[in-house]
Image (spheres, rainbow, N blue to C red):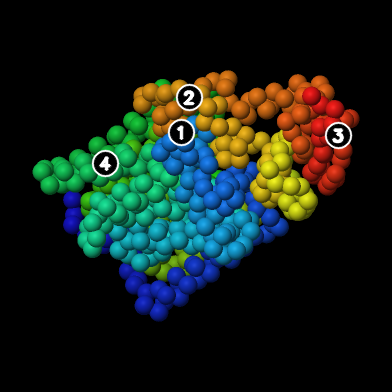
Amino acid sequence: MQGNSSSKFDVQYDPSRKTKILLMGLLLVLNVIIRIPSVPHEKGYDSFIIHTLANSVSIFNSARWWLNWLSVFGLYPDSYASAVPFTLSGISQVLGIEMEKAILLFCVSIGIFGMFTAYIFAGLVHKNFLFKYIMSLFYSIAPGFMLFTTWEVSTRGQFLVFLPLFLYILLKKDLKVNKCALLSICLIFIFATHHYAYFLLPITVSYISLKVIQKIKPEYLKNPYLNHLFLLVFVAVIIYPFFTGLFIPSGSRYAAIIGSIITNIRQTGPLIFLLPGGLVYLFLSKKNFEEIFMCSITIILAPIFYSQIYGPFILLIMCVFLVSIAFNNLLKIIVNHKHKLLILSAIIAILFLATFSSFYNHYRTGQSDSFWYMEESTYASGIWAKNHIPGDTYGLDSGMETGRFFAISEGHPIITSDDPINLAYGWINESDIHTVKNSPKSLEYYFDGPYSIESGTTFSGSIEWIKYTTKNIESLKEFDYFIQDKYDYKPVVDVVKRESNLIFDGTRISIWEITNEGMD
């Protein structure tokens, strides 16, 4: 093991301090410009759950979905990881701006912060400025990173921002403050952000194990056969899920592989085709401790590749790291040969990534083109309800676009949603929640938490039953209003139209007042 392997990654070009400042300034400007919205309103669907929870913190001055200390981390039934909703509520209240604008500011801010966390993390592995700059560039504009840092709030976005910072603290040797304290604070914060934090535990164990080996048997890390062992183990763990079905949903395993490849290309960007070169180079070259550590976590995280839901985001930091290694080696060839065609190829590759990321960040194709952001008509209906419908009234909804309406109307009326929101807004209370324990040996324990809702007892399920089985208006006496998404039909719509009063009729959303006169 070499004490410092930066020489093998060093491009023989060290920009002046002025040039470095200019390049970082341009990267900062790029990260701001590329996140300027091209749509009139907030993106996503699930993101509006966080929007609504943040609203509840501002309205009630507390997290009403907290029933247990595990609720802080979203690890108790009907709870949600709390870091992002609290941050958004704080931004909105301190600056006095509506939540939608707070979300825009939050996304741009963490996008820029992620640019710097990737930069400082890369600098711990290789001190070469161009390598740090390349990784910062590729990570901050990777489609999977931009997806949740461009006016679409998600706890995954904040996780991706703080993951490089966690790795930086873990690897940093000369911290001036207590390293264990910083790691503990960062780990707790990330656990309060997203359940992906579970993946930090084996990463931390791997670091500690390598440190112990380095202290007790340092020759093990200098063994010339270590490289081949890494490669062999990596091949074994990457094919293990194919034969066991781990992380593979029902269906063809070959289709799962193809789907995972496509999804990872979609979230990492087209430069992912450089990844095999970076992977082979990392495994087979001489290594310092940091590179050995990166080999180990590559092996640890490799099986999650088969999960199309979690894999692309968990692996994003590693994919960008490996692509950056390959691209940095390409730059070394360019500097050594100064061939115009090679220089042009590098410029085109960067422009291609920026274009690819921008396209998928600001446009959608196929069926998703019609609903990937909140329409102006939905926003207008939410504002109308906020100004004209009293608070502390309750409504039934038909689904889909009504979740966006609920976020904008700020609970005017309070409609049913995901169970954490139902708990926060008073639809359910603690006595209504029936829990079962999950085994630590099950995947549910790590993705859902130590407890889950007992099957068949969810409040959301009972509300869906009402939407499909209601025959007369008397069955809706607990509701004051009905919020209809015209694009999402439920049988209850016919009952409401026949026996209720239409008080607002928008392009997408209609609001009906359910008259309770004559009801028992």
In the picture of the structure, the residue carrying the numbered disc 1 is: 76
Q: In this view, does 358 lie above or below 225?
A: below
Quarter occupied by the C terminus:
top right
Q: Distance between the residues labelled 2 and 4?
A: 34 Å
For this rendering, which residue is in front, 405 or 162?
Answer: 405
User: Residue sitting at 43 percent across and 36 percent down?
Assistant: 68
Compared across the picture, whether 17 is left or right of 454 comes to: left
Q: What residue did someone put label 2 on?
A: 435
Residue 316 can be seen in this image: no
240 or 333: nearer the viewer: 240
Q: Are marks 1 and 4 in contact (CB under 8 Å)?
A: no
- Can you tell which of label 4 and label 3 is closer to the viewer? 3
Mark 1 is surrounded, within 10 Å at the Cα level, by few (under 14), some (14 to 19) or many (20 or more) other residues, namely: many
Q: Give the amino acid at mark 3.
A: Ser
* Distance between mark 2 and mark 1 Cα atoms: 9 Å
Marks 2 and 1 close (CB-CB < 8 Å)? yes
Q: Which mark is residue 500?
A: 3
Single out the mark in the foreground, 1 or 3.
3
Q: Which residue is drawn at 30% across and 59% down?
A: 124
Residue matched to label 4: 206
Q: Tell me which numbered mark, 2 or 1, is placed earlier along the sequence.
A: 1
Residue 490 visible at all: yes
Distance from Cα at disc 1 to Cα at disc 4: 28 Å
Q: Which residue occupies 32% across, 55% down? A: 168
Q: Where does residue 285 sit, x and y in percent of width and height?
A: 27, 49
Name the spot of residue 495 as percent of width and height, x first. 84, 27
Residue 108: x and y in percent read: 54, 61
As shown in the figure, which amino acid type bears the numbered disc 4?
Ser
Q: 178 or 133, which is in the foreground?
A: 178
Q: Distance between the residues labelled 4 and 3?
A: 62 Å
